[in-house]
Image (cartoon, coloured by chain):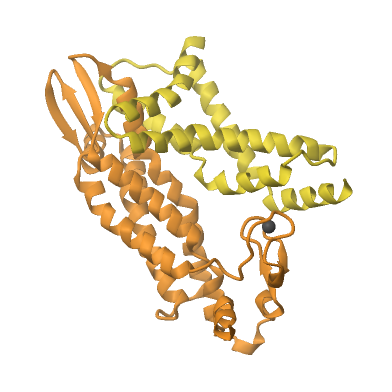
Chain colours: A orange, B yellow
Amino acid sequence: MYKANSYPPRGAEQGLASCHICEKASPISIGVCPRCGAHLHFRKPDSINRTIALMLSAAVLYIPANLLPILTIRELGIPREKTIISGLVEFWQMGSYPIAIVIFSASILIPLLKIIALLWLCGAAKGMIPYSAKMLGKVYWVTELLGRWSMVDIFVVAILVAMVQLGNYMTVTPGPGALAFAGVVILTMLAAMSFDPRLLWDQLEGKTEPDKINSDCE
Amino acid sequence: MDAGSIRTTLTLPRAAHALIHEGTPIVGWGVAVFTILTPLILAGGLVYVCVPLLFGRIAPGGMFVARWISITEPWNMIEVFLLGVLVSLMKLGKLADLHFGMGFWAFAVLMFCMAAAVAAIDKKELWDRLEVAKNHV
Ligand SMILES: [Zn+2]
């Protein structure tokens, strides 16, 4: 195993901060990135608190997102409400297994995994949970990469609402579940963006968060 | 076949418009932002910044545009929308006889090309080149 002092010095120890927009390393003392004009921080400000707050809101919304109807089909005046799960079951019964699996992953599995993964990452970055850096690096990468695909069900609702307006015969209207679900996807994406994976490496090397060193000195 | 392509491309604004008027304006605006606004900013911004860079020059406001490219990049969901189109067509397949025109496939290829173009951009190289061009002027 590595010892804490066997790592090369961090940029932050030399007063260098990497820009969040263009990744240029500049001295923190100049305040603003000379290349693109963004504000400089050693780490994303308030990263863990923001991530946890966004994640918990997403977790709360996840329940109505799956229980409330995402759309209502009115066939010959008779309304039928559909949730994400009932749409999934329909595809499965039709024998469209690949589509059913895609919907299941995008709408149910990915948001849930993202919520668990980001809370786990936050715990690890705070030093409350032991972890392997290699594995958590992968977890972070997957949450960033896959998050957008959860939006697919919202787009399906949008397309169906736009295309199926056949007067009295059949109309489709969006339900409250669609709003909750879009909220879950956007909140988990914002949470993944506000998480700073470098906090994991700080924790692993047994060093404090560089911004904390600063504020403690002031 | 041309009609097929026109109808599919019209679906984007129409889908957002329908949601805005069917009681979920917030979701409608979200769909509009993710499938129309951000891809336009991304594609337009990339052309605006990259073409002058080919000649070692920086477009006026290039740094500002490049910043917006970085910010909007994760919110471009055009390929997710394409998957949504496929799933909807499967759903609608039960109700009506739908057949894919050549236009649909052209639209699909266009979307994948755009997704690939965005993925191919090395942001670090883009910023390095912008900086070199800026210092030359
Ligand atoms: Zn910068």
Residue positioned most to the right: B136
Above or below: residue A74 compared with residue A205:
above
**Ligand 1's quadrant:** bottom right
Image quadrant in which the C terminus of chain A is located: bottom right
Front-lying residue, A197 or A99 = A197
Q: Residue at x 54, y 66 (%)?
A: A44
Above or below: residue A133 compared with residue B14:
below
Q: Residue at x 48, y 21 (%)?
A: B9
Residue A64 left/right relative to A212: left
Can you give x and y, in whole percent of width and height, for residue A81 in the image? 17, 34
Residue A161 left/right relative to B102: left
Q: Residue at x 40, y 80 (%)?
A: A128
Total numbered circles: 0
Quarter of the view holding residue A11:
bottom right
Front-lying residue, A150 or A192 = A192
Quarter of the view holding residue A215:
bottom right
Residue positioned most to the front: A218
Any part of residue B52 in sight:
yes
Can you give x and y, in whole percent of width and height, for residue B66 in the image? 67, 45
